[in-house]
Image: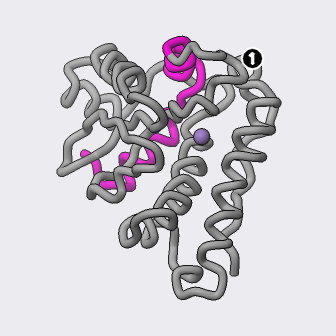
Amino acid sequence: MPFEQPPLPYAKDALVPHLSVEHFDFHYGKHHKAYLDKLNELTAGKPEGSKSLEELIKTTEGPLFNQAAQVWNHTFYWNCMKKGGGGAPSGKLADAIKRDFGSFDDFKKKFHEAGMTQFGSGWAWLVLKNGKLEVAKSANAECPLKQGATPILTCDVWEHAYYIDYRNARAKFLDTFLASLVNWDFAAKNYEKAGGK
Ligand code: MN
């Protein structure tokens, strides 16, 4: 069974005006799909083809790791956004953000900074590691699952993630992601699933 591209969790025009249909045509329809096609090419007829993406991320390196991680990262990322998103989390995750960052504003500042200081392609993350929330950044396909951390939220800061709608303005894209796109319900679910207290 080849790996399959899960459908977007919303319509391609759901995040307009923050992310355009054209953005999803390219980012989901071409970039994400290309990672899947390449992953299927690399695993066709091999035992790796029947492993989960998480297993491949944890146990492989090089081209196979890159494709598997980029497939997983993007599927996770689509779910990190929703129509009418942004604002602030509530419940346990909100309490934990306050506990581990001091305040929600301090978290936002750190997350934005991680996205801005990731030189070149990569990702900004909110992760749970050893019972504590941390902000992290990763280069290219790198995924916190490989470092034993649980992803709670991510933002894609590859140029292809914002060039269509924001041109070179990564800071403006990160501002918009935090203010208007973040799906805090998804992040809260990830936090609870990971056993966050
Ligand atoms: Mn991307």
Q: Position of residue 60 (x, y in %)?
A: 40, 70
- What's drawn in magenta, residue-wise? 171-197
Q: Position of residue 73 (x, y in %)?
A: 52, 49
For residue 23, which quarter of the picture?
top right
Look at 35% across and 50% down and name the residue there.
Answer: 144
Q: Compared with residue 167, is residue 181 higher up or lower down, i.e. above or below?
A: below
Colour scheme:
one colour
Q: Compared with residue 186, is residue 111 higher up or lower down, i.e. above or below?
A: above
Q: Compared with residue 168, is residue 149 higher up or lower down, i.e. above or below?
A: below
Q: Quadrant of ligand 1?
A: top right
Q: Nearer the viewer, residue 74 or 195?
A: 74
For residue 145, which quarter of the picture?
bottom left
Q: Nearer the viewer, residue 137 or 104?
A: 137
Q: Is residue 174 left or right of residue 142?
A: right
Look at 34% across and 54% down and name the residue there.
Answer: 194
Q: Nearer the viewer, residue 50 or 93?
A: 50
Q: Amino acid at mark 1?
A: Pro
Which residue lies under the disc numbered 1? 17
Q: Position of residue 119 (x, y in %)?
A: 39, 28
Q: Position of residue 28 (x, y in %)?
A: 72, 44
The C terminus lies in quadrant? top left
The N terminus lies in quadrant? bottom right
Look at 64% across and 87% down and name the residue there.
Answer: 45
